[in-house]
Amino acid sequence: MREKSFDMKHLHQRIREDLEARIMSGEWPPGHRIPFEHELMAEYGCSRMTVNKVMSMLAANGLITRRRRAGSVVAEPSNQQAVLQIQDFALEATRAGTEYRFKILHRSIEAIDAAAAQRTGLPTGTEMLCLSTLHVMNDVPQAFEQRLINLATVPEAGEESFKDDPPGTWLLRRVPWTEAEHIVRAVNADSAMAKRLQIQTGAACLVLERRTWQAGAFVTEARITYPGERHHLIGRFSPSLKGGTAAQAVT
Amino acid sequence: MREKSFDMKHLHQRIREDLEARIMSGEWPPGHRIPFEHELMAEYGCSRMTVNKVMSMLAANGLITRRRRAGSVVAEPSNQQAVLQIQDFALEATRAGTEYRFKILHRSIEAIDAAAAQRTGLPTGTEMLCLSTLHVMNDVPQAFEQRLINLATVPEAGEESFKDDPPGTWLLRRVPWTEAEHIVRAVNADSAMAKRLQIQTGAACLVLERRTWQAGAFVTEARITYPGERHHLIGRFSPSLKGGTAAQAVT
DNA sequence: TTTGCGATTATGTATAGACATTATCGCAAA
DNA sequence: TTTGCGATAATGTCTATACATAATCGCAAA
């Protein structure tokens, strides 16, 4: 039954990546029913054990929810699971029923500067789309986002207006990531930041820096500043159920 | 070959918990060789696939490192992997060769207050050991730790002097956790905190709150305040390799 | 129409065996 | 003594099968 396929990857890895990509890109939204094991088994021409191992792993990582007889569905993102699952504002707002707006404060295309080149591993001079976005819920500023998007990896971003979806949400739909790096810091708001976020100058803010790659190609860097009083990062773990859906809703 | 064992747990789960407990308690330190699959297979009286599935999962979670022919060893904690792996100071200091001291600033045994009772799920009035510890490296204060230890779960903590190991390290050796919850916030240092950490009043600090349970029994709560300028949280992920060794060195 | 129950179906767990891959060990040749 | 290479041992992947468990569906009885 086993047909050595053309590519080098192992079958279980290919299945895993296929499923992950469909989930993380939003093609299969939370609640979407995943093909039954016997269907995937037919699709990939492998035994049920192989499919089962992949699905069990996805379930252990919290990406899908499985129920006997009922089948498997894409899991609802749980805000108790993920350390770095700071919200995708649009998504969270819809769910909570609060009003959400965002505003692009700045947009330009620039050659990457030396410091950013080092952080991202790109050659200096690479063209980046630079965006500054303010996220507002119920007329209260919730976060300020400074983002670089690698136009070599995501050329269509250059043409995008970002009028429907904020950049993070837009990107997630198009470019699921395979690797990410995060840094969390505490900083005092300078006067410009304080004004933007409507907080006191000097107030403590949580800064999340997030860089993502797709198969080794740099995708985007986001520096998101949250008013410290209004936001925390929350995570719940057990030793073998770590991480969870850390990035299901963030880019 | 299969012998339905007396307990209700599934075999793979029992194996996983056994191995995790030995790793996380420090009984098997980083670098320690883990029994070969065929040894575990004999020990638990099961097939290799069962052992293999468990070991693969531990490897995927970064708890162990596996190499063909060489066998499996407990992984070195990697500071590029875990979001919440803020340092176990004693351990990090040893590794980096810097001088580390800690000082217990406060110690008392008190009935839990209402707010903490709610956070931890314990009945009000439960006796807790309350400790405040300052962590110092090269004469620079690195963190201030406020900790509650549940004496019902860890009675021997009441007798412990904590003169060799700081409370976190001491606990980790004795009480491996099975569940943990984390909250990260940014706050402005008040004057007492500023004095302790030798920073300016109002300076932004990163606060990590960590609560751990062992099989449902509350173990400890730690609130650790780091000077924002001197510390970040760093994490690196890929979608199916999330979390990593998040807690190997922290309690 | 509603309730109850058995058949069905999908997942959960486990076994035994096969072959691939790769690092290491030890022996033999240079 | 050193180098090279083959045997060996351990993990990696996968198949085929079996039985357990749980939820749902649909039919039949009340």
Image: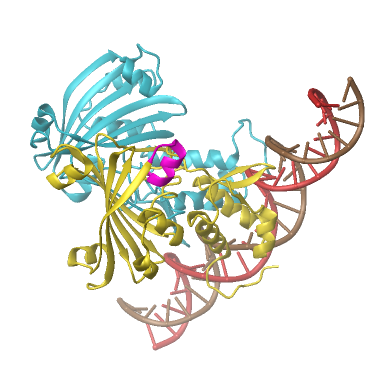
Chain colours: A cyan, B yellow, C brown, D red
The residue nearer to you, when weighing A123 against A50, is A123
In the image, residue B153 sits, relative to residue B132, either above or below, namely: below
* Residue D18 percent across, percent down from the top left: 67, 65
Quadrant in which the C terminus of chain A is drawn: top left
Q: Residue at x 66, y 71 (%)?
A: B3
- The verdict on residue A223 being magenta is no
Q: Residue at x 48, y 57 (%)?
A: B25
| Count of numbered marks | 0
Quadrant in which the N terminus of chain A is drawn: top right
Is any atom of residue A79 visible in this view?
no
Left or right of A167 on screen, residue B2: right
The residue nearer to you, when weighing A2 against B168, is B168
The residue nearer to you, when weighing D29 against A45, is A45
Left or right of C15 on screen, residue A232: left
* Residue A114 percent across, percent down from the top left: 33, 15
Res A89 → quadrant = top left
The residue nearer to you, when weighing A95 against A1, is A95
Left or right of B16 on screen, residue B230: left
Is any atom of residue A99 visible in this view?
yes
* Residue B95 percent across, percent down from the top left: 46, 39
- The verdict on residue B95 being magenta is yes
In the image, residue A73 sits, relative to residue A139, either above or below, namely: below
Left or right of A106 on screen, residue B245: right
Q: What is the magenta range? A: B85-99
* Residue B234 percent across, percent down from the top left: 36, 37
In the image, residue B88 sits, relative to residue B151, either above or below, namely: above
